[in-house]
Image (spheres, rainbow, N blue to C red):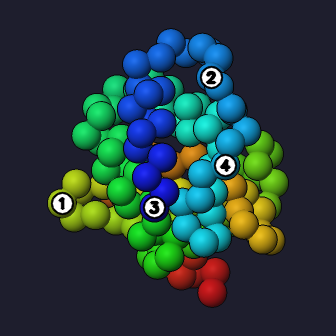
Amino acid sequence: MDNRIKKYAREFLNMKKGEKIANPQEIILVTRVARVTRRSLKHFIESRVEQGNSWDEIDYLLEKVGEIIKNPQLEILNPNQRNYPGSFLLGNFYVDKKKAVIVVLDREGGIRNIVTLYFAKKAYFFRLLNAREKNK
């Protein structure tokens, strides 16, 4: 993972919601096939803070994103196609946290943008996983 992602995440952690940032379109490669812009990363940080996630939880999400993209337990079409047509949910369940980490990637083709990432409850994750298995 690009070293800038955590540096920028820490920078955004203490900023006010809606506060302007320099170079919002700067691209940060997370894996060979996924990237995030500074603007998207700031929005992600704001959203997680708003939901009450601590820095340690945000750091955990950032640590897991590359692993999930490379080897997801779950990969399905995003049920929320209205906002992000063609997007996918990728995720893994982590026993140590008793939660899943979900990564939302935009539509397929080339290097994909990470729309967001978040924790999901065990029941939600396994409901999605079971639905995928039934549709195979």
Q: Which residue is mark 1?
A: 96
Residue 44 vertical placement versus 75 (above, below): above
Query: Residues under labels 1 and 2: Cα distance?
Result: 35 Å
Which mark, by number, is residue 21?
Answer: 2
Categorize mark 1 by other alpha carbons within 10 Å: few (<14), some (14-19), many (20+): few
Please tell me in which quadrant of the rendered image residue 9 appears. Answer: top left
Q: Which residue is mark 3?
A: 1
Residue 50 picture location, percent across and down? 44, 23
Query: Residues under labels 2 and 4: Cα distance?
Result: 14 Å
Query: Residues under labels 3 and 4: Cα distance?
Result: 13 Å
Categorize mark 4 by other alpha carbons within 10 Å: few (<14), some (14-19), many (20+): some
Categorize mark 2 by other alpha carbons within 10 Å: few (<14), some (14-19), many (20+): few
Query: Residues under labels 3 and 1: Cα distance?
Result: 22 Å
Residue in the image at 80% along x and 71% along y: 109
Sequence-wise, the earlier of marks 2 and 4 is: 2
Which mark, by number, is residue 27?
Answer: 4
Left or right of 120, for residue 34: right
In front of the other: 19 or 133: 19
Residue in the image at 69% along x and 55% along y: 113
Which mark, by number, is residue 54?
Answer: none
Sequence-wise, the earlier of marks 1 and 2 is: 2
- Which numbered disc, 1 or 2, marks the residue closer to the eye? 2
- Which numbered disc, 3 or 1, marks the residue closer to the eye? 3
Residue in the image at 54% along x and 81% along y: 133
Residue in the image at 54% along x and 60% along y: 30
